Amino acid sequence: MQAAWLLGALVVPQVLGLGHGARGPGRGWEGGWGGALEEERKRESLMLKNLQEALGLPTGLGNKDSVAGNPEGKGVWGTKETQGEEEEEEITTAPTSSSNPFPSPSPTPEDTITYILGRLAGLDAGLHQLHIRLHALDTRVVQLTQGLRQLRDATSDTRDSVQALKEAQVRAEQEHGRLEGCLKGLRLGHKCFLLSRDFETQAAAQARCKARGGSLAQPADRQQMDAVGRYLRSALAPYNWPVWLGVNDRRSEGLYLFENGQRVSFFAWHRAPSPEPGAQPSAASSHPLSPNQPNGGVLENCVAQASDDGSWWDHDCERRLYFICEFPL
């Protein structure tokens, strides 16, 4: 009995001294239980830290805080029980104060690969949709191109039709002018002559005769010239009007040509009346308005026929006169 009491008296103070970190008189135990308890305390502290990190709890709760917060000098086992209770309280109360009571675990490499594959699948689907839209756009472009080609063809056909209508109109006007010239004018051989009482320059008169299917009158011989003179005299009497013919010397001075380029083989130039032998020159014979023709030189290159006697006069081509057209019969 005394031996048991003695053993308890020796062991209990050492056990109680462990609560103070073996800093009392029992330092000799540090080499035995002290080292094992220290290792156990470190493991518990590490486990607690890992648990706090996993649960998202604030860290920093260790054995030193537990020992410092034990004013009554409790032993090691009491400290472990207190820590266990504090851990249970923290585990119980921490999720209620957190914004996310169920924190998601850290992603694994498999999760990362799955996420990347999902994103790639979404990109592939988007590219497929883009290809579909591009195909639709290509189809639309082809349709628009075909429509534009059809419009161009239609425009070309319309332009050709308009051109054909213009040509038909020109031919109709020429035929109408030819028929009018032969019905209203002078028929002579294979030609018809028609007087126009519009004042035009020599070039404008030629253009108007051509638009009507003819040209300015080109009497081929003396017989045609005399017939044209009689026609003009009967149409314009009792007045004397010069009328444009299709004769000019624009190419070379003194070289008179018809409008078709043929050279004139005969002329009917006006001549001043010659005085009788032995008679004195009269004022009429020397009148300045009745000189010999042609007398204009390079200033007068176009020929007009007088309506009273059928004589030829050279005039400035820009002068506006009546004109006479001829048409083929």
Image: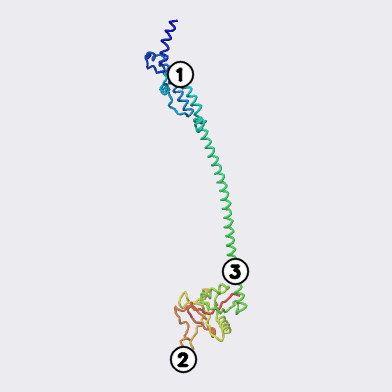
Q: Residues under labels 1 and 2: Cα distance?
A: 167 Å
Residue, far front: 72
Position of residue 68 in the picture relative to residue 121 (left or right): left
Circle 1/circle 2 CB separation < 8 Å: no
Asked whether residue 287 is in view, the answer is yes
Q: Residues under labels 3 and 1: Cα distance?
A: 126 Å
- Circle 3 SS class: helix
In terms of sequence position, does the residue under pointer 2 or pointer 3 come before the other? 3
- Circle 1 SS class: helix
Q: Foreground residue, 255 or 200?
A: 200
Please state which amino acid type lies under the numbered disc 3: Gln
Please state which amino acid type lies under the numbered disc 1: Gly
Residue at numbered disc 1: 78
The quarter of the image holding the N terminus is top left
Of tags 2 and 3, the one toward the viewer is 3
In terms of sequence position, does the residue under pointer 3 or pointer 1 come before the other? 1
Circle 2/circle 3 CB separation < 8 Å: no
Mark identifier at residue 283? 2
Of tags 3 and 1, the one toward the viewer is 1
Graded by Cα atoms within 10 Å as few (under 14), some (14 to 19) or many (20 or more), the crowding at tag 1 reads: few
Mark identifier at residue 169? 3
| Residue 181 in picture, x, y percent from top left | 60, 77
Q: Residues under labels 2 and 3: Cα distance?
A: 55 Å
Circle 3/circle 1 CB separation < 8 Å: no
| Residue 188 in picture, x, y percent from top left | 60, 79
Q: Foreground residue, 145 or 237?
A: 145
- Circle 2 SS class: loop
